[in-house]
Amino acid sequence: MAPASLQIRPACDGDADRLAFLTTQLGYPAHPSDLLERLHRLSGGFDHQVLVALVEGEVMAWAQVGRTLTLESGEQAELLGLVVDEAWRGRGVGAALVAAAEAWARSRGLGRLRVRANVTREATHRFYRRLGFEEAKRQVVFRKDLGA
């Protein structure tokens, strides 16, 4: 059950320190200035939203949702990132953010929300299954640094 003081709102510049802290906690070390620059690039667009969950006025989680369009799958929403402070996991904060992402997608006429999770994150898989997601496929992600 989510805390009574839980609020969800779009992320703002003042959240950069907490966004960086949470992103680092997820395993992706980040500096607040990098997160601020990325947030500026994502803000104000119709196709992306970064949301934060506040508990007692402090940012305890963030989620990024975006519209994707691919030739093979068409248009859908994708939950591009979600992290909840370790101290607040399992207390409804993440589920509230996912619900807000679903509402964002519906408000744009998108009928499907997709999320990807590392195959090693079994607790994350259980979380999404509890929220009604079903596994669609497993894949391998390749990366090539281009030196740019």
Image (spheres, rainbow, N blue to C red):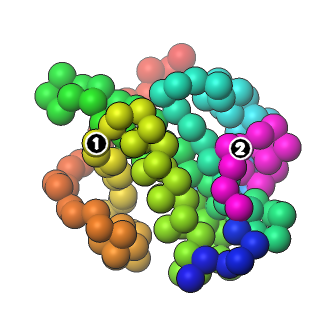
Magenta stretch contains residue 54: no
Up-down relation of residue 147 to residue 144 (above or below): above
Q: Which mark is residue 76?
A: none
Q: Where is residue 122? Give x, y as percent.
A: 35, 74
Q: Nearer the viewer, residue 24 or 6?
A: 6
Indicate the amino acid at tag 1: Gly
SS of the residue under disc 2: loop
* 133 lies left or right of 6: left
- Quadrant containing the C terminus is top right
| Placement of 18 over or under 57, stated as above or below | above
2 horizontally vs 132: left or right = right
Q: Residue at x 78, y 44 (%)?
A: 16
Are the residues flagged by discs 2 and 1 in contact, CB closer than 8 Å? no
The disc label shown at residue 11, or none: 2
Task: Examine the structure image and report whether residue 14 is included in the region drawn in magenta.
Answer: yes
Residue with the mark numbered 1: 111
The mark nearer the N terminus, 2 or 1, is 2
18 over 72 or under it: above or below: below
| Left or right of 146 on screen, residue 36 | right
Q: Report whether residue 6 is seen.
A: yes
Q: Is residue 122 visible?
A: no
**What is the quadrant of residue 111 in the picture?**
top left
| Point 14% across, 28% down: residue | 72
- Image position, residue 133 (x, y; %): 28, 63
* CA neighbours of label 2 inside 10 A, class few (<14), some (14 to 19), many (20+): many
For the residues labelled 2 and 1, the Cα–Cα distance comes to 24 Å
Residue at (28%, 45%) from the top-left corner? 112
Looking at numbered disc 2 in the image, what kind of residue is underneath it? Ala
Which image quarter holds the N terminus?
Answer: bottom right
Residue 10 point in image, percent of width and height? 68, 43
Which stretch appears magenta? 7-19
Q: Is residue 75 above or below residue 135?
A: above
